[in-house]
Image (cartoon, grey):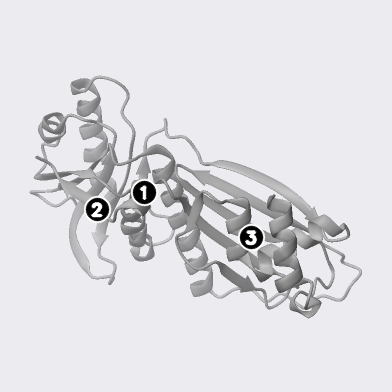
Amino acid sequence: MAANHLNEIYSSRVRGDKSNINYGSLIRWRVKTIRAGNMQIVKAYPAHVDYTQPRKVRSKPSREAQKKLNDRNRSEQFRLLLLTNFSGKDLFATLTFAEEPEDKSKALEKLKYFLKKLRKASTGEIKYLGVIETMNTDCDAVRCHIHLVISARDYEAIKKSWIYGNTKIQKMKDALDAAGYLSKTFVTMPAGKHHYVRSRNLKNPDIETKTLDTKYLPDAEELEAIITCPKEYAAVFYPDYELTEEPEIRRSSYMPGCYVRIEMICRDDPVMMEPTPPFANSS
């Protein structure tokens, strides 16, 4: 059934105009599917090039361009970790300091002591993921504070374990929005510093990779569908998912082909069923 539907897509959107795609010297592509909780991300990118063909000289990326790429990668890694390990059943805690620490390393020491006390006060395994903030998204300095997504269910244990200032504890309702909200802080963090804190017991997202060879018709046709009509491709292969944003297609200045990214979330997810704020106040 999916194959018949896909053939219709090829006939109307792809096979009618082969000029849409120019493989050039590209031979193989990778298609990576990342599963994180109720989210799926599909990425397609060139994997093997025929180097007997002429190739443009690659220019070294500027420092600013490299920083943006690093910020983007860290942000996505954080979002995927959060969505893989946490849900609306977990808590979002903001920890503030009555006496501001000298730097992030001192704040990290206090956070480690807090987590040690919390493990003793709680029953069961605790998972956490968070950021230590000293700047807002406008790069303005703010008082040091910590945002922490945590699996502990005991509000009082969290409050008693944080002895350095005030706490604000909320039940997280929308993991996707919470992940986006926290990951924005990475643009304000200097390279090489603590970008986020996490427990060791977090699971990594599930990643599946396949190779498409443009010399074979089925592979080439699937790749053309991903690149020229990603929305229709997602609808055929992921019917239970809905796009969270427009598919992204980026081209390289020195290499043929392009990079495609499709992000989706399960239709049965409460986020898709009924809009809610990312956090809800505790009772």
**Contact, mark 3 vs mark 2 (Cβ under 8 Å):** no
Spatial CA span between label 1 and label 3: 35 Å
Q: Name the disc covering residue 6, or none.
A: none
Extreme residue toward the right, this view:
52
Residue linked to disc 1: 196
Residue linked to disc 3: 233
Q: Amino acid at mark 1?
A: Tyr
Residue at image position (44%, 41%) is 84
Residue at image position (32%, 24%) is 125
Q: Which-is-in-front pick, marks 1 and 2?
A: 1
Q: Of residues 56 and 180, which is closer to you in this image?
A: 180
In the depicted structure, whether residue 159 falls above or below residue 77: above
Whether residue 62 is visible here, answered yes or no, is: yes
Question: With 230 as the anchor, is 175 left or right in this view?
Answer: left
Q: Quadrant of the C terminus?
A: top left
- The x, y position of residue 251, in whole percent, is 65, 74
Q: Which-is-in-front pick, marks 1 and 3?
A: 3
Spatial CA span between label 3 and label 2: 48 Å
Q: Earlier in the sequence, mark 3 or mark 2?
A: 2
Q: Of residues 46 and 107, which is closer to you in this image?
A: 46
Circle 2 — which element?
loop
- The x, y position of residue 107, in whole percent, is 23, 46
- The x, y position of residue 41, in whole percent, is 54, 53
Q: Name the disc covering residue 103, or none.
A: 2
Circle 3 — which element?
helix
Circle 1 — which element?
loop
In the depicted structure, whether residue 3 falls above or below residue 231: above
